[in-house]
Amino acid sequence: MTRFIHWSDLHTEFDPGNMIPFEMPDLPKDIDALLLAGDTGVGDGHLDFLQRAWEKYEIPIISVWGNHEAYKNNYTLLRKREADRLLNLRASGMDIRVLHGEATQVSGVTVIGASMWTDFSLYVGMEFQAKQIANQQMNDFHKIRIGERARHLTPNDMADLYAEDKARVTGLLEEHKDDVRVVMTHYMPSEACIHPAYRGDLLNASFATNLEPLIWDQGPNFWIFGHTHQGLETDIDTPHGTTRLRHNPRGYPHEKSAFNPHRIIDTDDPERKFL
């Protein structure tokens, strides 16, 4: 039996001024790892939280980036700075893993993680319009810089990052096809995860892509996602079995989300959602 706690969208960048800052709960000793599906904190605050989580739980802390991790930063430089700091944290004995299109093993389970940005193709034939709306309405393209010249991130840059992540995740799913597999991305892998109140809105292409063909082809056991704070969980039946799409976002301080710090994935009891 392998059991993971999974959280997303903690947005700890708001905690200093938040009347109810996030407090990590006590967890049972048989939890194998904590999975964080992005938007944990901004810049160095991301690893700051991962370090605090390790110090409290002393279990593997596994994370992917959301879009907010790179806010007020240069994406390229932050990735380098993170890699250097992770080396030091691991050298001190902390089991902290940040996945950028990579796989890792925990208690016999393969966890495959990536941001899995977006290529704005959720609504076929509307990619150009979706990029225009995203550029106007998404803070990502005003708060994230990239490259040596520190220019603003563009929708085309994001589509390139998505293509890299998708290629890596696809290859890793195939490489580990005989394993129990948990995929963790920040962005939603299916339109079915979008709350009905937002269905049909072209801005959804900034939050999700249609990865159902990949899920159908590979059939991972679970797919954890974030980004939306009001999404839907669903199950997708594939030739390989059922893939369970799960999320557990805390969201912004003013929101009333369904976040539960005791949400779990249990590989022996896949229908179970809570401790």
Image (tube, grey):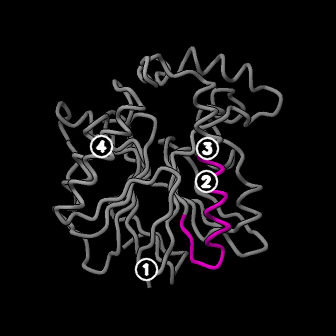
- The residue depicted at 61 percent of the width and 43 percent of the height is 164
Camera-near label (4 vs 2) is 2
- Against 178, residue 237 (above or below) is above
Question: How far separated are the C-alphas under marks 4 and 3?
Answer: 22 Å
Relative to the observer, which residue lies in front, 87 or 179? Answer: 87
Q: Is residue 86 magenta?
A: no
Magenta span covers which residues? 165-182
Residue 156 percent coordinates (x, y): 63, 25
Mark 3 — residue?
164
- Mark 4 / mark 2, whichever is N-terminal: 4
> Could you tell me the amino acid type at mark 2?
Arg
Q: Is residue 246 among what the camera can see?
A: no
Residue 123 percent coordinates (x, y): 77, 33
Relative to the observer, which residue lies in front, 168 or 24? Answer: 168
- Mark 1 / mark 4, whichever is N-terminal: 1
Q: Is residue 176 magenta?
A: yes
- Mark 1 / mark 2, whichever is N-terminal: 1
- The residue depicted at 38 percent of the width and 39 percent of the height is 79
- The residue depicted at 75 percent of the width and 26 percent of the height is 127
Relative to the observer, which residue lies in front, 261 or 154? Answer: 154
Choose top left, top right, bottom left or bottom right for residue 26: bottom left
Choose top left, top right, bottom left or bottom right for residue 119: top right
Mark 4 — residue?
46
Relative to the observer, which residue lies in front, 244 or 69? Answer: 69
- Against 120, residue 273 (above or below) is below
